[in-house]
Image: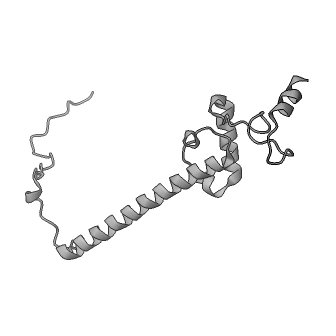
Amino acid sequence: MTEPIEASTDDESPEEVETPDTPEEIEPAEDADTFPRSYVEKLRRESAGYRERAQVGDTYAARLHTELVRATGKLADPTDLGFDETHLDDPDALAAAIGDLLSRKPHLASRRPVGDIGQGPVSGNGSSVDLAAILRQRAQ
């Protein structure tokens, strides 16, 4: 037969510890490292300076990426390709990314005409323009 388990009458529950609700009630431990306020402020200013420099560097990197994409001449708008840091160091990765973007979205390709499109100066004629000769050439 099993005996019934008696409820314990002793107070065996752990003591409840009150946690402070406000920062004023929290006191630092005696062995904690503390620094003078001026030193902490100096460190914070220094860190802020580094964050600002990093932000400027990120801006320059984004501008460089845009200009590298523009130099390829494959996209109508070089900002269509999102910034990727690996494109700055690896021209093959940049070309692959542009190729992938154009295969997915061909409407982003540059529409700049290349070659002889019948406008502008014609090589071989020198500096004089003979309108009658141009008309005869096109009439044939």
Would you identify the image quadrant in which residue 52 lies?
Answer: bottom left
Q: Nearer the viewer, residue 135 or 17?
A: 135
Q: Position of residue 59 (x, y in %)?
A: 46, 55
Q: Residue furthest right?
A: 140
Quarter occupied by the N terminus: top left
Closer-to-camera residue (23/29): 23
13 displayed left or right of 54: left
Question: x and y percent of residue 119 in the render?
Answer: 74, 35
Q: Measured from the top left, where is residue 20 in percent x and y?
A: 10, 53
Q: Which quadrant is home to the C terminus?
A: top right
- Please name the residue shown 17% across and 68% down the image: 29
Taking the spot 67% from the left edge, 34% from the top edge, the residue there is 111
Residue depicted at x 62% and y 47%: 70
Q: Residue 120, relative to residue 42: is it above or below?
A: above
Q: From the viewer's perspective, is 59 left or right of 29?
A: right
Residue 8 versus residue 25 in the image, above or below: above
User: Can you tell which quarter of the image residue 46 is in?
Assistant: bottom left
Residue at 66%, 36% (x, y): give it: 110
Q: How many marks?
A: 0
Q: 33 or 16, which lies in front?
A: 33
Q: Nearer the viewer, residue 7 or 70?
A: 70
Tell me where residue 78 appears, x and y as whole percent.
58, 43
Identify the colour scheme used. one colour
- In the image, taking residue 3 as reference, residue 125 lies left or right, namely right
